[in-house]
Image: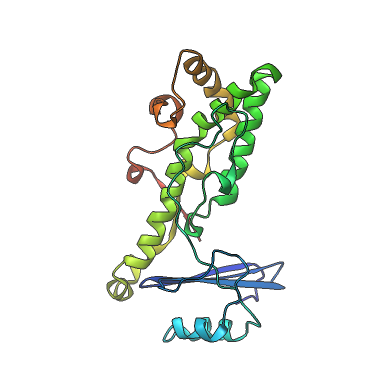
Amino acid sequence: MVESGDTFNAWVGPDKHFLATSVKDGRDFSWVCTHKDDADIKESWETPGKIEDALKILQGWDPVVLAIVRATPACVDWKVVYRDPLPTWISPKARIALIGDAAHPFLPTATQGASQAMEDGCTLAICFELAGKERIPEAVRAYQKIRYDRVRAAQKTGEDTRNNWHKSDHDRLASKPMDMKKLSLHKEAWLLAHDAEAHAYQVYPEIVKGLRGGMTNDPASVPKETVVDWVPMPMADTTAMEVT
């Protein structure tokens, strides 16, 4: 699997998927198995897992998958916990703002946690630059207005991918190889080609005008045609970019 250096491979089945990645020209290797379960463990990144449990969950899967797991010296067991979107990311007086996963955690199937955190930071920096030191709360409020709906749309892609991978008719897809592309990791142009810096410069004046005119602190009050023109309406009409 790692003869050609960095690789990414995915296996998908009912209520579970297995992702394996080699990096550093094949010197490092990692895998993750996401599966439906009814266990209750504490919310932690460090709960020790059991290789035998992983093998049991993956029983009957591709021998390559089982060989990868058997070759693994140790693993961790961390629960993917869904979080409803926060109604706001900022404090009442707009002196504190959350960014990244603290504001909007992503499912791993979105593959957007780090990217959206960087967009947050870039947008917040532009808002501070344009507002100046005397208008920091205004900059913080503008940051949330600019980012909120785009982030929510990005979060939705992770939910859609997970449901597509776990709930498809896998037996039918296996009998029609051309239909297997439906399980590919699709990322739309509006998500990958977005320039957060340019967008912040573009929409900041209009957002601030609204804030000064009495616009509420509810992110949903931002006119979508002004702030989220890069969110497809509906998303299904957007040309997809296939990541392989």
Q: Within the image, what quadrant is residue 171 found in? A: bottom left
Q: Which residue is rendered at x = 55% and y = 72% of the image?
A: 77
Instruction: Between residue 212 and residue 227, name the one nearer to us.
Output: 212
Q: Within the image, what quadrant is residue 96 found in? A: top right
Q: Position of residue 69 (x, y in %)?
A: 57, 82
Q: Which residue is rendered at x = 72% and y = 66% of the image?
A: 24
Q: Position of residue 123 (x, y in %)?
A: 60, 32
> Measured along the vertical axis of the image, is residue 191 above or below residue 96?
below
> Measured along the vertical axis of the image, is residue 214 above or below residue 94?
above
Q: Which residue is rendered at x = 32% and y = 66% of the image?
A: 167
Q: Quadrant of the N terminus?
A: bottom right
Q: Is residue 18 left or right of residue 48?
A: left
Q: Position of residue 36 (x, y in %)?
A: 40, 71
Q: Is residue 234 left or right of residue 114?
A: left
Instruction: Between residue 173 and residue 155, name the one nearer to us.
Output: 155
Q: Looking at the image, can residue 182 be seen?
A: no
> Measured along the vertical axis of the image, is residue 29 above or below residue 238?
below
Q: Is residue 150 left or right of residue 234?
A: right
